[in-house]
Image (spheres, helix red, strand yellow):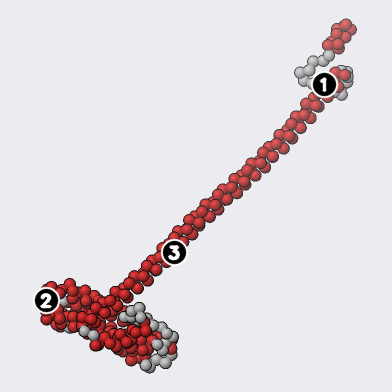
Amino acid sequence: MDQLSAISEELADIDGRVADNFRVLSNGFQKLDKIKDSSRRSRQLEELTNVMRDSKRLIKEFDKEIKALEGNYDRETNKMLNEKKQSMIKELNSYVALKKQYGTNIDNKRVELFEGPNEGYAEENVLLASSMTNEQLMDRGNHMMDETDQAIERGKKVVQDTINVGTETTAALKAQTEQMSRIVNELDSIHFSIKKASQLVKEIGRQVATDKCIMGLLFLIVAGVVAIIIVKLVHPNNKDIRDIPGLAPPAMNRRLLSHHN
């Protein structure tokens, strides 16, 4: 760690985090032997698999940092850094082999980090890693890391497509909700207009009834006046019928009175 710190703080930090992950893996696999419940063993193995994934990512970052600093140091320093990386890969492969061993007994839940297309030979490839040269081991590790990255990218694309579909569905539902709200508002307006029209019809009906009453009264008054006039003309000497104001007595009466005098 101190030697790496003198070279690069970034490399020393990555190395420390990988070492922490390896301690977690070592303790975790020791606990697996004590867990009897299959579901708990499965969960424990999944957690360890996630730690192995994180270790694989950190080793890849370590490799990138080495390549970035390769021109700044001599051959011996670069050799030491590559040997450190190979040591990390070998240790991680040993945990992958343990995971494979435990995984075959837990509901066939196999999530291999460094498996290629031929799944049946994964364990054999891991066990043979120690006999490979450093260059071959590094190429194999990088190839498997790239395959894992591609699988992760495919998973991300599926998730993003799902999010896009959900967003489009949400937008469509929102538009339909707004349309329904507008329809409800229009129905409220129509209901209000019908109510106002009904009140107006009732008001017009009351006005028409009032006008009919007034016309009826006027007709009765006019008919009464006409009847009095007719009776007065027919019976001018009838004292029971008062003279209608403004109506002069018949001219015949006036002539008879003058002749009598």
Question: In the rendered image, which quarter contains the N terminus?
Answer: bottom left
Name which residue lies at 69% across and 39% down: 205
Name which residue lies at 56% across and 48% down: 189
Q: Mark 2 points at which residue?
A: 73
Tell me: 23 left or right of 187: left
Question: Residue 27 at what x, y percent from top left?
Answer: 31, 89
Earlier along the polypeptide chain: callout 3 or callout 1?
3
Say which amino acid is labelled 1.
Ile
Question: Residue 152 at what x, y percent from top left?
Answer: 34, 73
The 10 Å Cα crowd at callout 2, few under 14, some 14 to 19, many 20 or more, is: few
Tell me: 199 left or right of 141: right
Tell me: 151 left or right of 81: right
The 10 Å Cα crowd at callout 1, few under 14, some 14 to 19, many 20 or more, is: some
Q: Distance between the residues labelled 3 and 1?
A: 94 Å
Question: What secondary structure is marked by label 2?
Answer: loop
Residue contact between numbered discs 3 and 1, judged by CB atoms under 8 Å:
no
Of residues 259 and 187, the one drawn nearer to the viewer in this rendering: 187
Examine the rendering and report whether any part of residue 128 can be seen.
yes
Question: Residue 135 at what x, y percent from top left?
Answer: 21, 80
Tell me: 82 left or right of 171: left
Q: Name the residue under label 3.
A: 166
Say which amino acid is labelled 3.
Gly
Q: Name the residue under label 1.
A: 229
Q: Distance between the residues labelled 2 and 1?
A: 141 Å
Question: What secondary structure is marked by label 1?
Answer: helix
Name which residue lies at 45% across and 59% down: 171
